[in-house]
Amino acid sequence: MRAYNANTFQLSSKAKEILLKFSTNHSLPASFVFRSKIALLASEGRSNPQISAETRIAYTTVCTWRNRFYNSAELITQAEECTESDESSLKLEKTIKSILSNEQVPAAKPVFTPEQTQLIHELASKNPKDFGWKLSQWNLPALAAEAARQGIVESVSPDGIQGLLTPAAAP
């Protein structure tokens, strides 16, 4: 079996100092603390399994945040290149906070078009008996099967139907 080599990156002493401060700060959200520890250990060259074992953080989480820092190395470098040292430290701290937050996680692209979503909503409001189903009301598997049978979608799982019919949480 071929060994997997995780992305490696170096952090400046300023960036390490900020991450160390975050990793020991009890007033920050726990996610920031854990993510800071992951970045620090990764920058020291530790493997993902080592970091996972040492921090007791799920391996997949370690991989996610290691890659986030690896992919953000240029942002960190740009933040450090400010001319004034106080401004540089503040900008670097702000940049690292933004990397540690979930704000940079791109939203998943919608699987279905608005038209498909609307048609599934309309189908869900109709009586399943009108389509040959021996049901008094739709269940998720039947609705998924009927949406595919009618050609509204190529395929959709019952969970996908539930996601389409469940209102999104308010921000």
Image (cartoon, rainbow, N blue to C red):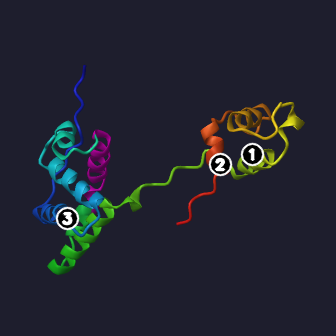
Relative depth, front residue between 85 and 118: 118
Q: Which residue is located at x 65 percent, y 36 percent?
A: 156
- Residue 69: image location, x then y, percent: 27, 53
Residues at circles 2 and 1 in contact by the CB criterion of under 8 Å: yes
Residue corresponding to mark 1: 120
Q: Which residue is located at x 87 percent, y 30 percent?
A: 132
Is 11 left or right of 28, judged from the image as shown?
left
Residue corresponding to mark 3: 22
Span shown in magenta: 59-75
Q: Which residue is located at x 25 percent, y 55 percent?
A: 35
Q: Is residue 87 above or below residue 74?
A: below
Separation of disc 1 and disc 3 at Cα? 46 Å
Q: Amino acid at mark 3?
A: Phe
**Is disc 2 placed on a helix, strand or loop?**
helix
Relative depth, front residue between 6 and 101: 101
Q: Amino acid at mark 2?
A: Leu
Q: Amino acid at mark 1?
A: Ile
Q: Quadrant of residue 86?
A: bottom left
- Which of disc 3 and disc 1 is earlier in sequence? 3
Tell me, yes or no, whether the highlighted magenta stretch contains residue 77.
no
Residue corresponding to mark 2: 164
- Residue 123: image location, x then y, percent: 80, 44
Q: Is residue 146 above or below residue 43?
A: above
**Is disc 1 placed on a helix, strand or loop?**
helix
- Residue 157: image location, x then y, percent: 63, 35
